[in-house]
Image: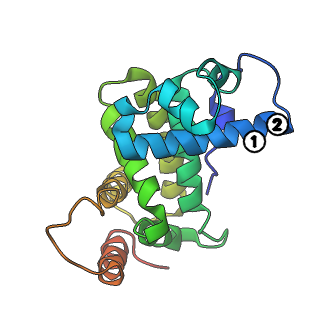
Amino acid sequence: MPRASAASERKSRRGRPPNSDGQETAARLLDAAAAACAESGFDGATLNEIARRAGVTAAAIYNHFESREDLLYAAGVRALERVTDVVPPEAGVDAARIIAASYVRPELKETRRLLAELHVASARDRRLAQLLAAWHRSWAQALKAVLPPDDPAPDATVKTLFLLLLGLCHFDDLVAVRATQAAVVERVESLVDALIPPA
C-alpha cells in the first residue's frame, strides 16, 4: 500500500529551506491546522487561527506551505497516514478491513472530523478537490491491486469502500443512534468482508 506523502504532492515551497527547527514548526502547523479544522470547520480554520495555535505569524506559514488549502490538505494526508500505518505490509486484501475498523478508534476523533471537513469543502474549493482526487486515484490503484482477480467491478468496489470510510468520518456526529464502538467495528468488518472477501 502506498504511504500518502504531502511533501511529494506539494509544489516547491517559498521561503527558507527546511531545517530541524523548520520541521518542528511545520509539525506544529499541521497539528494546529488539524485542530482548527476539526473544531471550527474548513472555513473557520483561517491562517490567523492556525498561526495563533501554532505560535507563529500567519506570514510564517508560507515558509512551509504554499497556501491554506495545501496546509489543510497536508494535515489531512498526515491524518490518513495515521490510519493506514496500522496496516502491516503483508496484509494484502485484509488491508481494507483493517483500515475501516481503525476509522472508529476513539483517538481518531479529530482525524475523522478533519477528513469529513476536507471532503465537504472540496465541493467548493477546486484546489482542495484536485489534491483529494490525486490521493483517491493513488489509493484506488493500490486497493485494486489487492482485490480478488474475479472481482466483477473493481472500480465500484473501491468507490464503495471509499464511501464507507467517508461515512465512518461521521461516526461521532450520529449521536441519536446508540451503539458501542466494538459493535460498529464488527458490522464494518462484515460489510468490508462482503465487499472484498478475505483471502
Crowdedness near tag 2: few (<14), some (14–19) or many (≥20) residues, C-alpha within 10 Å: few
Q: Residue at x 19, y 76 (%)?
A: 178
Front residue of 28 and 85: 28
- Residue appearing at x 58%, y 45% in the figure: 31
Residue 148 in sight from this viewpoint: no
- Please name the residue that numbered disc 1 is placed on: 24
Question: Which one is in front, 131 or 149?
Answer: 131
Q: Secondary structure at mark 1?
A: helix
Q: Is 147 rendered above or below residue 68?
A: below
Mark 2 and mark 1 in contact? Answer it, CB < 8 Å.
Answer: yes
Badge 2 is on which residue?
A: 21
What residue lies at 61% left-to-right and 20% top-to-bottom?
A: 66
Q: Amino acid at mark 1?
A: Glu
| Image quadrant assignment for residue 17 | top right
Residue 116 at what x, y percent from top left? Answer: 35, 47
* Quadrant in which residue 184 is drawn: bottom left
Q: CA distance from mark 2 to mark 1?
A: 5 Å
Circle 1 crowding by C-alpha within 10 Å: few under 14, some 14–19, many from 20: few
How far across and down, in percent of the image, does residue 89 sit?
67, 68
Quadrant (top left/top right/bottom left/bottom right) for the N terminus: bottom right
Q: Which element is circle 2 on?
A: helix
Instruction: Indicate left or right for 86 with 158 as reference.
Output: right
Give the image location of residue 58, x and y in percent: 58, 22
Please provide percent x and percent y for residue 199: 50, 79
Rendered residue at 51%/70% (across/down): 93
Residue type at mark 2: give it: Asp
Q: Is residue 35 above or below residue 111?
A: above
Please say if 165 is above or below 59: below
Q: Is residue 78 visible?
A: yes
